[in-house]
Image (cartoon, helix red, strand yellow):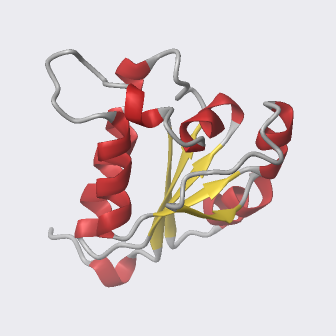
Amino acid sequence: MGFEADSVAGVALLLWACEPEAPQRLATPFFHAAAAAAMDVPVEIYFSARSVHLLVPGVADALRASSRHDKTIADALREAVAHGAVLLACTDALHAQGLGDAALIPECTRRGGAVQFMARACDPRWRTLVF
């Protein structure tokens, strides 16, 4: 049974346990997002909780998932965006983390949180992953 892109409206990823303090967990969601986007599947990445810190300029640039991995977390994030993934910052998480008025990386073009992600999770045409 092969994959049929027309049968899936998109993939939504929720970054919940992906904080800068645990860089070993940060590359995987972006690799999955890039793979889905490269398959022409719409991809939305929702940044919640402490993961919103990855959207602050310079933070993801300073992180690597492993000392044996050449790419930074910012490289992996930008690769996903280059394939078509859309980044959404949760406004409640931004405020809770003291980042409500902070400038975010230019790749993050939208805001979206629990309501938007739950709309995707409740839509049978969307697939959701939580990291």
Q: Residue 12 versus residue 88: which sits nearer the camera?
A: 88
What percent of the width, then of the height, locates residue 70? 16, 30
In the visual, does 79 lie left or right of 106? Answer: left
In the visual, does 131 lie left or right of 101? Answer: left
79 relative to 38, above or below = above
Quadrant containing the N terminus is bottom left
What percent of the width, then of the height, locates residue 129? 48, 46
Q: Quadrant of residue 47?
A: top right
What percent of the width, then of the height, locates residue 59? 51, 32
Which residue is at a point 63% across and 51% down the rendered structure image? 104
- From this viewpoint, which residue is outermost toward the bottom? 6
In the visual, does 130 lie left or right of 32? Answer: right
96 relative to 105, above or below = above
Q: How many marks?
A: 0
Q: Residue 125 versus residue 117: which sits nearer the camera?
A: 117
What percent of the width, then of the height, locates residue 6? 34, 84
Which residue is at a point 85% across and 33% down the rendered structure image? 96
In the visual, does 76 lie left or right of 87? Answer: left
Which residue is at a point 66% across and 29% down the rendered structure image? 50
Q: Quadrant of residue 49?
A: top right
Q: Quadrant of residue 95?
A: top right
Which residue is at a point 64% across and 39% down the rendered structure image? 52
87 relative to 75, above or below = below
131 relative to 105, above or below = above
